[in-house]
Image (cartoon, rainbow, N blue to C red):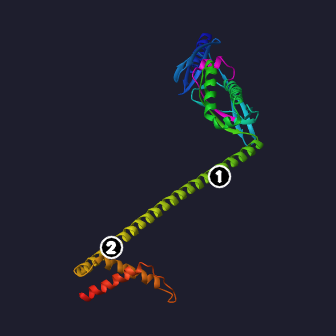
């Protein structure tokens, strides 16, 4: 084989190798940034892509990884040839922040972000995860520094919303979209926790006393209302009983009066032809009065008024009427 054939064979092998290397398969939700002669050329899409290996090169990106183990936090850096376009969860290590009322609080957060422009995420920032972490830490300090401890503990949604809005705006030039920011833990110092627990117990005791007082108040009100209703019912019963008694007495007196009137009429009818009925009635009344006066002690002395002679004459007249009858 002559020299020309050898050269042609070598060139053919080089062409075949470069052609094979020129076929690049990119997985779904991944991408690659290609530089041609040191300048950005294009971004590869998912599927089969063809490049020129001699003049085209893949631009690598440095990525920071944080892992929490039982021994502590481990930080590693890797060079990545391919960018993951899926949403990434970044767990920040715990950090101390100071609230507006000067309480040092330990906070760690989760950040959910996604690369939307691979070229800018490669060329606009040197280490994207590290930059996002530092930006989140400083933003979190600023947001927490504007709030009291009680507000910090009770306003996680507000803090998350503020952080997401600030980070999303700041990372837009890096080709990153911040979707969510979540505060995992907010740990005040131990003495603050003890004070908060005492305050919580005192607040619960106060609420219990208020509820007990309100219960006693309602019980007393119901008892007073019941007693009032009972008194009203008793008064109504007494009133009805008195009315019935009065009606009964009135009816009895009417009956007695009617009976006496009938008796007088009978007597009047019997003696109307022989004497004066008025004398009879007066005489009977005097006799009843004399019975009451002489009842009881037999040694009692009874003085008769002068007018009794009229009564005696009436009695004598009655006797004469009865004798003539």
Furthest residue in direction left, as rendered: 273
| Residue 206 seen anywhere in this rendered image of the structure | yes
SS at mark 1 in the image: helix
Residue labelled with disc 2: 257
- Residue located 62% across and 27% down the image: 162
* Magenta span contains residue 46: no
Residues tagged 2 and 1 counted as in contact (Cβ below 8 A): no
| Residue 81 seen anywhere in this rendered image of the structure | no
As drawn, the label of residue 190 is none
Point out residue 186 in the picture as x, y percentages from the top left corner.
Answer: 69, 38
The answer to whether 105 is drawn above or below residue 129 in the figure is below
The answer to whether 23 is drawn above or below residue 321 in the figure is above
In the picture, which quadrant includes the C terminus? bottom left
Residue labelled with disc 1: 209
Residue range in magenta is 108-127
Point out residue 107 in the picture as x, y percentages from the top left corner.
Answer: 70, 35
Which of marks 1 and 2 precedes in the sequence? 1
């Amino acid at each position: 084989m002559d020299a020309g054939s050898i050269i042609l064979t070598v060139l053919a092998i080089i062409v075949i190798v470069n052609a094979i290397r020129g076929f690049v398969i990119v997985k779904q939700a991944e991408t690659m940034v290609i530089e041609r002669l040191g300048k950005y050329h294009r971004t590869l899409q998912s599927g089969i892509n063809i490049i020129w290996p001699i003049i085209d090169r893949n631009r690598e990106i440095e990525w920071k990884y944080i892992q929490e183990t039982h021994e502590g936090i481990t930080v590693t850096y890797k060079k990545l040839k391919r960018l993951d376009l899926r949403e990434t969860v970044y767990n920040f290590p715990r950090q101390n922040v100071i609230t507006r009322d000067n309480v040092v609080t330990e906070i760690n957060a989760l950040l959910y972000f996604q690369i939307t422009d691979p070229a800018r995420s490669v060329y606009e920032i040197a280490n994207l995860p590290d930059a996002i972490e530092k930006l989140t830490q400083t933003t979190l300090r600023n947001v927490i520094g504007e709030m009291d401890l009680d507000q910090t503990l009770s306003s996680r949604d507000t803090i998350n919303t503020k952080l997401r809005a600030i980070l999303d705006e700041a990372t837009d030039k890096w080709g990153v979209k911040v979707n969510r920011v979540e505060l995992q833990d907010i740990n005040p110092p131990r003495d603050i926790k003890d004070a908060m627990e005492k305050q919580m117990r005192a607040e619960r005791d106060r609420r219990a006393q208020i509820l007990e007082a309100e219960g006693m108040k309602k019980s007393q009100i119901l008892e007073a209302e019941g007693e009032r209703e009972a008194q009203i019912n008793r008064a109504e019963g007494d009133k009805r009983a008195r009315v019935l008694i009065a009606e009964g007495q009135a009816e009895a007196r009417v009956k007695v009066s009617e009976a006496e009137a009938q008796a007088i009429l009978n007597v009047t009818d019997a003696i109307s032809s022989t004497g004066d009925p008025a004398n009879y009635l007066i005489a009977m009344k005097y006799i009843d009065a004399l019975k009451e006066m002489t009842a009881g002690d037999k040694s009692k002395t009874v003085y008769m008024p002068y007018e009794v002679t009229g009564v005696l004459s009436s009695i004598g007249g009655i006797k004469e009427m009865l004798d003539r009858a």
